[in-house]
Amino acid sequence: MRKINVFDTSLRDGEQMPGIALTVKEKLEIARQLERLGVDIIEAGFPASSPGDFQAVKEIAETVKGSSITGLARAKKSDIDSAWEALKSSAEPRVHVFLATSPIHMEHKLKLTPDQVVERAVESVRYAAEKFPHVQFSAEDANRSEWPFLKRIIEAAIDAGASVINLPDTVGYRTPEEISKLFEFVTENVKNIDRAILSTHNHDDLGMGVANSLAAISAGAGQVECTINGIGERAGNAALEEIAVALQIRSDYYQAKTGLKLSELKRTSALVSRLTSMNVPGNKAVVGANAFAHESGIHQDGMLKNKETYEIITPELVGATSTLPLGKHSGRHAFKTKLNELGFSGSDEKLQTIFSAFKQLCDKKKEVTEDDLYALIADATDDQ
Ligand code: KIV
Ligand code: ZN
């Protein structure tokens, strides 16, 4: 099994989501939980972007020692200096330098020629490598870049001292098949690629962030960049919890594993949701409130007989619990089990009366609570 490094960017790319602004204290609380979860690398922020971000990265670097801490820097000396000041006390100082490599970004955003972009990348990676033991170079918008140019700039960055090369799908444009081909091309054609770890970083604009990350892992990526609950710019980033659980449940297919303590996933998701005020949709894979809830009668009956009938992930794996919420689709088997849990031990005839009253109530109310069930039991008993 290949070990995949998990690089969490909830505190940097995730925090770029409109509506999120975390305090230093909140960032520290999330970083500690990410450490408990077993994340390999925490991108704690972008030190040169604001005094608050600088302070957060510095405090996290000083406090969190179980994960490697990194910070983002544009390909310029002042950003790298700022990152060094914030990160120098971390266990393994690591900087994340990025520069765009796609024609549209180079021409319209950077207003630089491809030769100037290579020159700036080399100069910054070399400068960063004089201070940091680990330097990651990201070719921003790599997935819309020309492959011969990517090959050239990656080779130059590795020669200048980069130990991680990240190929982001910055605008969430690619499909899993296309991402696979890019990673295969880089693995097979870039000189000295074995001196660096290849990383994948995918946005979710077309809803393919997680699928693209898994495809890149299959095609050779040794690091995956993601966020808790998929928070991030626009439609967000690939969701950490979905990638981690897919690798675990389908280890037969991916032949790769993470070092995460998966039972911390639900708690991490809840903390990030609470501190960012970004609600997790009920039907969100792995951490949504309904991810382990079974309402229909046929499913509840199957679950009561053997959980594997309808659950491929055990809720305990991610620190959640399974529920059989009672609603209009529920059947007699789950209903009887629930009533017995509430202390009902009457006859089958009485059970049938309560079940009929319950179905009528379901047509009037979205959610039938335990209090409603106690009331139905009491009504049936009073009628005697
Ligand atoms: O999406 C992106 O390209 C980024 C880079 C800074 C890595 O977030
Ligand atoms: Zn990004």
Image: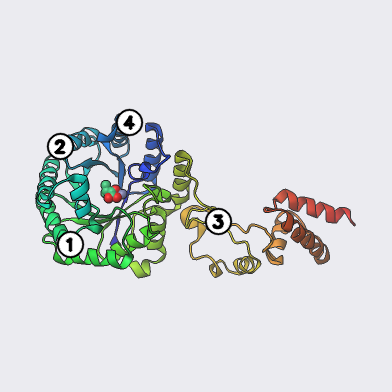
Mark 1 sits on what residue?
A: 147
Q: Which amino acid type is marked by label 3?
A: Asn
Colour scheme in the image?
Answer: rainbow
Circle 2: residue type: Lys
Left or right of 219, for residue 296: right
Q: What distance separates the C-alpha of mark 2 from that of mark 4?
A: 20 Å
Left or right? Give the position of 23 relative to 357: left
Question: Which residue extends farthest front?
Answer: 108
Q: Name the kind of residue labelled 4 in the image.
A: Gly
Q: Which residue is mark 4?
A: 52
Q: Secondary structure at mark 4?
A: helix
Separation (CA) of disc 1 from disc 3: 42 Å
**Where the C terminus falls, by quadrant?**
bottom right
Residue at 28% x, 38% y: name it: 46
Q: Is residue 172 visible?
A: yes
Q: Position of residue 348 (x, y in %)?
A: 80, 66
Image-quadrant location for residue 188? bottom left
Q: Earlier in the sequence, mark 3 or mark 4?
A: 4
Element class at badge 3: loop
Residue underneath mark 3: 290
Q: Is mark 2 within 8 Å of ligand 1?
A: no
Q: CA distance from mark 1 to mark 4?
A: 38 Å
Name which quarter of the figure residue 335 lies in: bottom right
Disc nearest the viewer among 1 and 3: 1
Q: Of circles 1 and 2, which is in front?
A: 1
Q: Nearer the viewer, mark 3 or mark 2?
A: 2
**Which of the labelled discs sits on residue 77, or is there none?**
2
User: Which of pointers 3 and 2 lies earlier in the amino acid sequence?
Assistant: 2
